Amino acid sequence: MKNTYSTNLNLPQVDIGILIFRILIGALMLTHGVPKLLRLFSGEEISFSDPLGLGEVTTFTLAVFAEFVCSVLVILGLGTKLAVFPIIATMATAAFIVHANDGWGAQEMPLLFLSGFLLLFFTGSGKYSLDWYLLKENK
């Protein structure tokens, strides 16, 4: 009971926690990225918000890159600290620009994703990742 209310930063447990979190948040983001990827290659006309004036297709392609490619990299733990930047930028744009006037309900999910990927930026991918495996000789 005593351990229930204390903070224990047991490193093996932290690494397992980061692994689980990384896989889950990456997989959840993929549920948004896969349909966009399929739509990008479907040949259908792309109609997408263009809040930064880059063009609808360019903005959509960048969203696909962030939500699909970068999510896969996060799940694998490969280049995690770099891979989260496009996702963070996409979620910040969605929350603070695209859905700025839509209220909390529309902003909540991008803000949750933003929070999770910010956490991964600060923690890194942990021991159970390709980042750690590929760089372990240098540690």
Image (spheres, grey):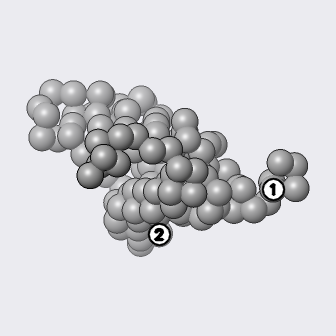
Q: Is residue 8 above or below residue 29?
A: above
Residue found at x 35% / y 40%: 6
Side of 15 relative to 130 (left or right): left
The residue that label 2 is drawn on is: 41
Side of 131 relative to 96 (left or right): right
**Amino acid on which the number 1 mark rests in the picture:** Lys
Mark 1 Cα shell of 10 Å, populated few (<14), some (14-19), many (≥20): few
Q: Residue furthest right?
A: 137
Q: Is residue 10 visible?
A: yes
* Quarter where residue 103 is shown: top left
Going from the N terminus, do you reach mark 2 or mark 1 first? 2
Q: Pick the residue in front: 123 or 95.
A: 123
Mark number displayed over residue 136? 1
**Amino acid on which the number 2 mark rests in the picture:** Phe
Q: Pick the residue in front: 67 or 16.
A: 16
What element does badge 2 sit on? loop
Q: Is residue 73 visible?
A: no
Q: Pick the residue in front: 83 or 1.
A: 1
Residue found at x 12% / y 40%: 105
Side of 15 relative to 110 (left or right): right
Q: Residue 84 appears at what percent x and percent y?
A: 53, 44
Q: Is residue 21 above or below residue 9?
A: below
What element does badge 1 sit on? helix
Residue found at x 50% / y 57%: 13
Q: Residue 119 appears at what percent x and percent y?
A: 46, 40
